[in-house]
Image (tube, grey):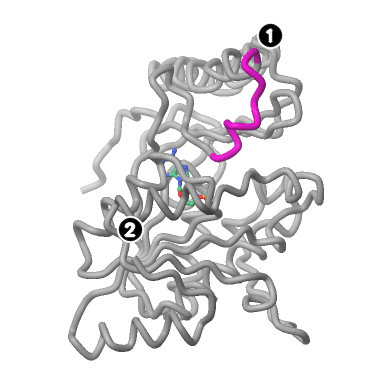
């Protein structure tokens, strides 16, 4: 595995692959890698000839300086994991490489970036869209792999790729979970042992709420009960807990008859956890 720190080094490598007719897969990450990230790497390896993984803790997508400062950074361990996983290039630019002096461009995706995490974290998706666009163009990736755990992010990235005609195919992968159901996340390592035990309530409450909604219970009532269940399980606050159309993120207030996703973000101590599950809707085919 080669480690590239500059666009020039990355491009030199990728251009040679392109000349050889090889397909390039990319997995953008912020590091502190876990098996969720590695599942994307496995998908990329299966679908592409060469795989680039980027690690860049992108300052512009953090709305809170203390969250950015506390974000775990484990570069050596990450590099070892990626080497074992068969990654060809680890791209680890520094902030000056990504945002040179005078940097003045922002990509802002309307619609799908509003509400949910976009509502709770102003400017977050501008930062995500801008950095993902840069990373995809820097690596000249043919395919890029994203986790459904960040469900709204996938919608933002897909919208951007469509709107800007970026020549890259977006592939999504299911959420990897710990044995007790907690979605794997770099932020989990910031949970105290006690908070880690309580964290399992998030997927449990979501699964139960999704079942109730699928069974035809009143949606607003099911959401209210789930919200209360999170607070009584020890979550300090809930940023959002909403039912959305899985295809365009439109809010849903009735028992779904089209693919739906239950999405939540909640705080446990000073750690913000997000998760989402499909609601097994009784889908009516329109003929
Ligand atoms: P991050 O490092 O948190 O920015 O995540 C990098 C990529 O890994 C994003 O596409 C995430 O959606 C994906 N990812 C993070 N956690 C998981 C998980 N538990 N399962 C699958 N993909 C994940």
Mark 2 is surrounded, within 10 Å at the Cα level, by few (under 14), some (14 to 19) or many (20 or more) other residues, namely some
| Number of numbered discs on residues | 2
Magenta residues, as a range?
186-194
| Residue 170 drawn at (x, y percent) | 36, 63
SS for tag 2? strand
Q: Which mark is residue 171?
A: 2
Q: Which mark is residue 232?
A: 1
Relative placement, left or right, of 10 versus 236 is left
The residue nearer to you, when weighing 157 against 32, is 32
Residue 24 vertical placement versus 158 (above, below): below
SS for tag 1? helix
Judged by its main secondary structure, the magenta piece is helix
Mark 1 is surrounded, within 10 Å at the Cα level, by few (under 14), some (14 to 19) or many (20 or more) other residues, namely few
* Residue depicted at x 58% and y 66%: 129
| Residue 222 drawn at (x, y percent) | 56, 17
The residue nearer to you, when weighing 54 against 107, is 54
Q: Which mark is residue 116?
A: none
The residue nearer to you, when weighing 233 against 222, is 233
Q: Is residue 188 magenta?
A: yes
Residue 44 vertical placement versus 202 (above, below): below
* Residue depicted at x 41% and y 54%: 146
* Residue depicted at x 30% and y 28%: 282
Relative placement, left or right, of 138 versus 89 is right
Residue 1, picture quadrant: bottom left
Does the numbered disc 1 mark a residue whose Cβ is under 8 Å from ligand 1?
Answer: no
Q: What distance separates the C-alpha of mark 1 from that of mark 2?
A: 37 Å
* Residue depicted at x 35% and y 52%: 172
Relative placement, left or right, of 11 versus 249 is left
Q: Is residue 3 magenta?
A: no
């Amino acid at each position: 595995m080669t480690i590239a720190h500059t666009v020039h080094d990355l491009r030199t490598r990728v251009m040679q692959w392109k000349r050889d007719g090889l397909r390039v897969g990319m997995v953008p990450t912020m590091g502190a890698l876990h098996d969720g990230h590695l599942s994307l790497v496995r998908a990329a390896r299966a679908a592409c000839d060469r795989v680039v993984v980027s690690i860049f803790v992108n300052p512009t997508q953090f709305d809170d300086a203390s969250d950015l400062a506390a974000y775990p950074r484990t570069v050596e361990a990450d590099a070892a994991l990626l080497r074992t996983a068969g990654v060809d290039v680890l791209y680890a630019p520094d902030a000056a490489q990504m945002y040179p002096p005078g940097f003045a461009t922002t990509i802002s995706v309307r619609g799908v970036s509003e509400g949910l995490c976009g509502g709770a974290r102003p400017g977050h998706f501008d930062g995500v869209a801008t950095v993902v666009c840069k990373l995809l163009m820097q690596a000249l990736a043919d395919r890029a792999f994203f986790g459904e755990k960040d469900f709204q992010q996938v919608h933002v990235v897909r919208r951007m790729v469509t709107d800007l005609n970026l020549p890259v195919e977006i592939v999504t992968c299911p959420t990897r979970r710990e044995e007790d159901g907690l979605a794997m996340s770099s932020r989990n390592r910031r949970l105290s042992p006690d908070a880690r035990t309580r964290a399992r309530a998030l997927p449990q409450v979501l699964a139960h709420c999704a079942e109730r909604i699928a069974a035809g219970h009143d949606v607003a009532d099911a959401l209210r009960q789930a919200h209360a269940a999170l607070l009584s399980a020890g979550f300090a606050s809930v940023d959002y807990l909403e039912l959305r159309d899985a295809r365009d993120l439109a809010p849903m207030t009735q028992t779904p008859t089209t693919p739906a996703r239950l999405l939540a973000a909640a705080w446990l101590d000073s750690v913000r956890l997000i998760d989402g599950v499909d609601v097994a809707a009784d889908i009516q085919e329109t003929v």
